[in-house]
Amino acid sequence: MKEILQYLKNHGEQFDTEIAVGTGISLANVRLQLAELAAKREVMTCHSIRFEKGKKVEGISCRLAGYIPPAAPGRKPKTVLKIS
């Protein structure tokens, strides 16, 4: 499970198939571990359907729960609204 958590921290939101390929863990094992992590509320999961080249692909989209990635370089600072 630590491998999946570290992978999500490094790569952000990913599909279960992408996690399986990236970590080298079987897809069935990744789905079991994601279910355990979701039960512990360490990751957020969402059943997702996407279409690739006209073919329907079902999977699980997941990300770390409560994790906000650092701001991308080059962003402008937030403006403060002053009311007179």
Image (spheres, grey):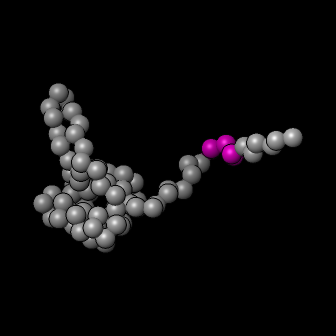
Image position of 67 (left or right of 58): right
Image position of 80 (left or right of 56): right
Image position of 69 (left or right of 7): right
Q: Is 78 drawn above or below residue 51 in the view shown?
A: below
Q: Is 54 drawn above or below residue 71 in the view shown?
A: above
In the picture, which quadrant includes the N terminus?
A: bottom left
Q: Is residue 79 magenta?
A: no
- Secondary structure, magenta segment, majority class: loop
* Res. 35 image quadrant: bottom left
Region of the chain picked out in magenta, as a range: 74-78
Give the residue drawn at x 50%, y 56%. Answer: 69
List x then y, in percent, for residue 50: 23, 37
Give the residue drawn at x 17%, y 65%. Answer: 32
List x then y, in percent, for residue 2: 31, 72
List x then y, in percent, for residue 55: 14, 32
Q: Is 55 drawn above or below residue 37 in the view shown?
A: above
The answer to whether residue 24 is seen in the rendering is no
The answer to whether residue 60 is seen in the rendering is yes
Image position of 74 (left or right of 6): right
* Res. 65 image quadrant: bottom left
Give the residue drawn at x 29%, y 64%. Answer: 38
* Res. 39 image quadrant: bottom left
List x then y, in percent, for residue 80: 75, 45
Q: Nearer the viewer, residue 58 or 7?
A: 58
Instruction: Farthest residue to the top: give it.
Output: 54
In the picture, which quadrant includes the C terminus?
A: top right
